[in-house]
Image: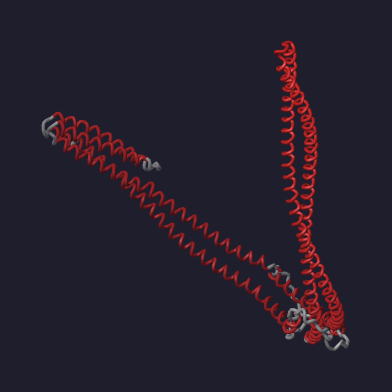
Amino acid sequence: MRLANVRIGVRLSLGFAVLLVLTAALGLLSLNRIAVVNGATAEMATNWMVATRSLGDYRAAINGMRRAEAQHMMSVTDAQFTEQERVIEKARAEAAKHFSTYVTTVTTDEERPLVQAIQQAEKAYYEVQRELLATSRATDGVTDALRAIYGGPSSQAFAQLLERINVDLDFQTRGSDQTYKLSQDTYTETRWEVIGMIVLAILIGAWTAYVLTVSITRPLVHAVNMAAQVASGDLRAGRTMERRDELGQLMRALSDMSSNLARVVMTVRQGSEGVATASAEIAEGNHDLSARTESQASALEQTAASMEELSANVKQNADNARQANQLAMGASTVAEQGGQVVAEVVGTMKGISESSKKIAEIINVIDGIAFQTNILALNAAVEAARAGEQGRGFAVVAGEVRNLAQRSAQAAKEIKQLILGSVERVEAGAHLVDRAGGTMEEVVASIRRVTDIMGEISAASSEQSGGVSQVGEAVTQMDQVTQQNAALVEQMAAAASSLRQQSQALLEAVSVFQLDAAEAGLSSVSKRTVISGPPSPLPMRTSVSAPQRVPALASTRHKNDDWDSF
């Protein structure tokens, strides 16, 4: 399989994969060797060093116990004996603790006999120690028997125990040295292995980089040359490379780009003349559009004037409606005051009617009194007639009193009739006043409704006036926009003329490209004559100032004048 037929991504992936595999192998080897060194270091820290330190502390506790035995032998009082025995017990507890710590580190069969030997020697030493302490407490001072025990069995047991401890310490030292040597050997081997892997990775990486660089840069040089050929304007068919990777695709794409660009240039040559003709027609159409726009602007000016007159009339109607609303509000106020006066009159009439009724009742009382007076006068006259001559004068008086009583009764009847007539008229007047009050309330309500309607009419007139003003402003703005459009149409005519000139420049620009003979024959076009000169602009009215704008095509022309190459 040729390397040129393999995709660049696959090539790069394979190269990086080789480097990654070498890096991973180097890392795994380093991790393995580091694990060995770490295991040796951990064994030294957690086994050999702990065992050596524990045995050393154990030996120190035994030595302290031995010194306490000597002090016990020289003690005299019970307090001294007790103090030294306490020291011995404390040292024995320390020794037991350190020895237990050491036993936890024992993991090999080679070391277990050493532990058993120490335990046997310790047991023998403790038995002799008990005998020594008992003898020391039982005797006064240092006797020959006590010296014999201390210098004989006790000394032998102590020496044998120290010898067993020293043998075990030598074993721990040898194990620690072996572990240290193993870690050093592993470090040396690992260093040379890592150096070898690094050198191998550098050699393979350099070879891979060279192969990948050559397989990529050489085709890129060919692609750059083809792109430079196209950039110089040579659009003739270029060579292609028989490759299946991305660079081969790039070369084929450049070749296709050259072919497509040649067809585009040919199409541009054929279409430039059509653009020039179309731009001339656009200029003529813009001239007609400018004339119609001017006509529309005049019509909008007339419409604006009419809207101003309509706005003035609407404002006058709004003012009249506002005045009518104020008059209606005044009439409503006067009607409300008249209603209040009528209500007061109704109340007064009711008071008069009640007073007339009371007067009629008083007249009835007077009539009753006159009737009773007449009866009494009649009785007095009868009694005077019975009395004869003695009662004649009294009879005359009784007759006069009767006449007065009859006249009073007659007058009371007449007054009663007048009062009753007056009461009827007052009641009739009160009914009429009540009806007048209801009518006034209806008049007040009607005036209020008229006032509300006039207020609505005034508000509607104000809104209508504002709407007409807005319409007038909109028409004015439309007039301004129309005049601006007229100016823009003239600018478009000038732009169309510029476009025609640029199309001619475009024909000259694309002529620099070199095409094949067949394509060049197809792209030959005949020059047409077009309108030579932009249409004369219409005169603009002085009422509206057109905004100054620079045609976009004019600026584009300067950018495209030097279009010599693609």
Q: Looking at the image, is 136 positioned above or below residue 343?
A: above
Residue 352 percent across, percent down from the top left: 73, 36
The answer to which image quadrant residue 60 occupies is top left
The answer to which image quadrant residue 523 occupies is bottom right
How is this picture coloured? secondary structure
Using the image as rendered, state which of residue 311 and residue 166 is in the foreground. 311
Q: Looking at the image, is 441 positioned above or below residue 474?
A: above
Q: Looking at the image, is 297 positioned above or below residue 80?
A: below
Q: Is residue 111 visible?
A: yes
Q: Quadrant of the C terminus?
A: bottom right
Residue 466 percent across, percent down from the top left: 76, 64
Q: Residue at x 79, y 32 (%)?
A: 418
Q: Quadrant of the N terminus?
A: bottom right
Q: Is residue 229 visible?
A: no
Residue 166 percent across, percent down from the top left: 28, 45
Q: Residue at x 74, y 85 (%)?
A: 561
Residue 205 percent across, percent down from the top left: 57, 68
Using the image as rendered, state which of residue 307 and residue 54 is in the foreground. 307
